[in-house]
Amino acid sequence: MSNKRVVTLLPTQVGNSKRLLYKIKYMRIAINKSETGSGKTYESIYILEELVAARLCNKVICIVPDGVTNSWVSFVDKVGISYGVYSHTQISNATDFTEKTM
């Protein structure tokens, strides 16, 4: 991963992102239940970048809403790790998966 960030957080997103990052690092799981439009995608990509930089993550599986699958593929591809991005519909129907191995 390069030193250049894929996303930049707004000040209102920083606190929640750090809480989620802590939970992932120490509890190995977190769910972002923020309001629609609050920037969950950007927060999640920021967290992913932090985990990759700390060498705590080298691949990721993302389950995302149908309408944001393509943007997630684009963002995670820029982070430069192996990934699988799946929409809820794809998981339900077990079809059309987007995966990339580095």
Image: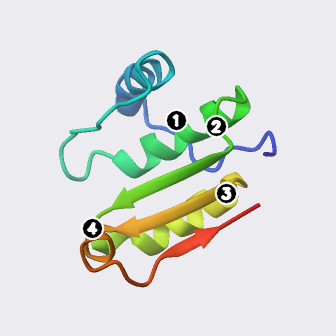
Q: Give whichever of discs 2 and 3 has the lower sequence position.
A: 2
- List the residue tagged with mark 2: 57
Amino acid bearing label 3: Ser
Amino acid type, label 4: His
Residue drawn at x 35%, y 26% as measured from the top left = 16
If you read the primary sequence from the N terminus, does the residue marked by circle 1 or circle 3 appear first?
1
Real-space Cα distance between discs 2 and 3?
10 Å
How crowded is the residue under tag 2: few (<14 C-alpha within 10 Å), some, or many (20+)?
Answer: some
Spatial distance from mark 4 to mark 2, Cα to Cα? 23 Å
Residue ID for mark 4: 88
Instruction: Indicate which disc, 4 or 2, sits on the residue closer to the N terminus.
Output: 2
Label located before the other in sequence (1 or 4): 1
Using the image as rendered, state which of residue 87 and residue 15 is in the foreground: 87
Q: In which quadrant of the rendered image does the N terminus lie?
A: top right
Q: What is the crowding at mark 3: few (fewer than 14 residues within 10 Å), some, or many (at least 20)?
A: some
Q: CA–CA distance between discs 1 and 4?
A: 21 Å
Q: Residues within 10 Å of mark 1 (few under 14, many from 20)?
A: some
Q: What residue do we see at 75% from left, 44% from top? A: 4
Identify residue type, mark 2: Cys
Q: Position of residue 101 (x, y in %)?
A: 71, 64
The secondary element bearing badge 3 is classed as strand
Q: Position of residue 6 (x, y in %)?
A: 64, 50
